[in-house]
Amino acid sequence: MKKKEDIAVLMASTECYPMAKVGGMADVVGSLPKYLAHLGVSPSVIMPRYARPWFDKNPGKIIHDSIIQYPHAHHPFRIWQHEDSDLGYELYSVELPGLFDRESVYLAEDGHGYRDETIRNISFQRAILQWWHSDPDSFDLIHCHDHMTGLIPFLMKYSYEYPALRQKPSYFTIHNALHRGRCSWNNLSLLPHFDTWKGGLLDWDEAIDPLASALRVSDGINTVSPGYLEELPREAQGLEWVFAHERHKMSGIINGVDYDVWNPKTDTLLPHHLKKSIHSFKRKNKAELTASFAEPDLPLFVFIGRFAHQKGVDILIQSIDTWLNHHRDANFFILGSGDKSLEHLAGMVYGKYPQSVRVVFDYNEPLSHVLYAGADFLLMPSRVEPCGLNQMFSMRYGTVPIVNHTGGLKDTVPDITVDGNGLSFDGVQTDQVLNALQRAMELFSDQKSYKALVEKIYKLDFSWEASAKRYVDAYKQLL
Ligand code: ADP
């Protein structure tokens, strides 16, 4: 129930769990608002209305019906309100026929990004602003997530179409700066009229660059971990200068875990729940995974994630191949999909060692939960990891993370040699991963130390409590 003094925040995102999830951004947008709601914030989320089962089951009601005016065409859109859901925040969806009535969020059937990404993102953002402008007092500020909503801060301030939003603050969260949504200036006519003197704020390197624009124009910004914030001014694919220049309005706020979903005692996607002992919880869930292929007493290493260069999947597969070529004392379970050449590599290692390796090329939420619960170790050789949630989910379920020392992994997984939570290595090369595997095997063979570590990590606090307060402080500063 909204109180008068609550800060009304509109979160704009192309992903939100459980409606549509591709990665960690969906987890964040689907959980942070619930926690903000206890801290004097009245949170709302607005997202595209995809052709996804959640929207069939929760159709909602139409509260706004309008058109976006392009120079040679009109694009109709409708805003739906989903009042009856028990999400813990208000949800609105933007229906844009022909653009978002697809099941896949970003990728076409050929595995590449949709070719109409630019008009999709611009239409989504224009629809949000048009709707908000029809009742500007409904929200105190907007909180945008990644480049897909990165033009909103600029359009609010400098477009002639939304004068009533000019004084409203915008806040921007960077979940992943590797993707920027760049498009050629030929797309200029898709944008509403704006103060052309300010056009430079849209440009980076002779293209419209939504991420670069959001960095310069948003009133407040955060990255999803302090470690990532530190790295960006040194390494940001050409945007280093912008990150350094805008540093004064940026902070690093580590993501939290939604404990309503990720609870070993109640997780509805697990076959076995935590009762008295974390070790028997893990043993039972592990048996579900190894039943079809592996020896349950051997350590089980898992990887869950997008098959992308960023995630170090190439080095991971090469390391597994080398390891199994010399030893047969460990099992590996890989869940993920994406880059076809990486899928091919993973398929080859599975073909070579079917008794020790399982690969599932899929996005499979239920299986991922069983893997977090049943594994002994989680591998995350990410080259770049803005925050990373997998390592936190795994620790919550007593699985020891093995990570590259980067971004949010650096913040959440100090090495056991410094009384930390897992194994950390420095640099994504096969030697480093093999060395980490060796250390993991030694740890596992010393069951007393291994079990003590499991008992320590599953009790660590990765909840949203502290981080949600930091977002509220950031909103208050802007108001
Ligand atoms: P990113 O957002 O870069 O993909 P994160 O670690 O922040 O990485 O979040 C990944 C999220 O996506 C986690 O919730 C993880 O469990 C989930 N995930 C990734 N790949 C899969 C998959 N193949 N099946 C199920 N869940 C997955």
Image (tube, rainbow, N blue to C red):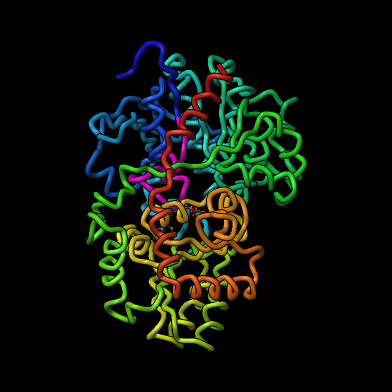
Residue 188 x/y as whole percent? 64, 37
What count of labels does the image hold?
Answer: 0
Write the start and end of the magenta stretch as one range.
11-29
Residue 287 drawn above or below residue 226: below
Vertical position of residue 252 compared to residue 411: above or below: above
Residue 247 can be seen, yes or no = yes
Closer to us: 444 or 449: 449
**Residue 331 % position (x, y):** 41, 78
Is 213 or 101 nearer to us in this picture? 213
Q: Is residue 20 magenta?
A: yes
Vertical position of residue 111 compared to residue 141: above or below: below
Relative image position of residue 77 (x, y in whole percent) = 40, 33
The residue lying at 69 percent from left, 48 percent from top is 231
Q: Is residue 347 above or below residue 388?
A: below
Q: Is residue 8 magenta?
A: no
Can residue 76 be seen? no
Q: Residue at x 46, y 59 (%)?
A: 108
Residue drawn where x is 62% and y is 29% of the image: 218
Please state if 159 lies on the left or on the right of 63 as rendered: right
**Furthest-front residue in view?**
448
From the viewer's perspective, tell me whether residue 409 is left or right of residue 353. right
Quarter of the image for residue 33 reads top left
Q: Position of residue 475 (x, y in %)?
A: 53, 23
From the viewer's side, name the closer residue of 411 and 13: 411
**Apparent side of residue 369 relative to residue 254 in the rendered image (left or right):** left
Q: Residue at x 57, y 48 (%)?
A: 411
The one nearer the camera, 202 or 298, is 298
Looking at the rendering, the quadrant in which ligand 1 lies is bottom left
Relative to 200, 340 lies left or right = left
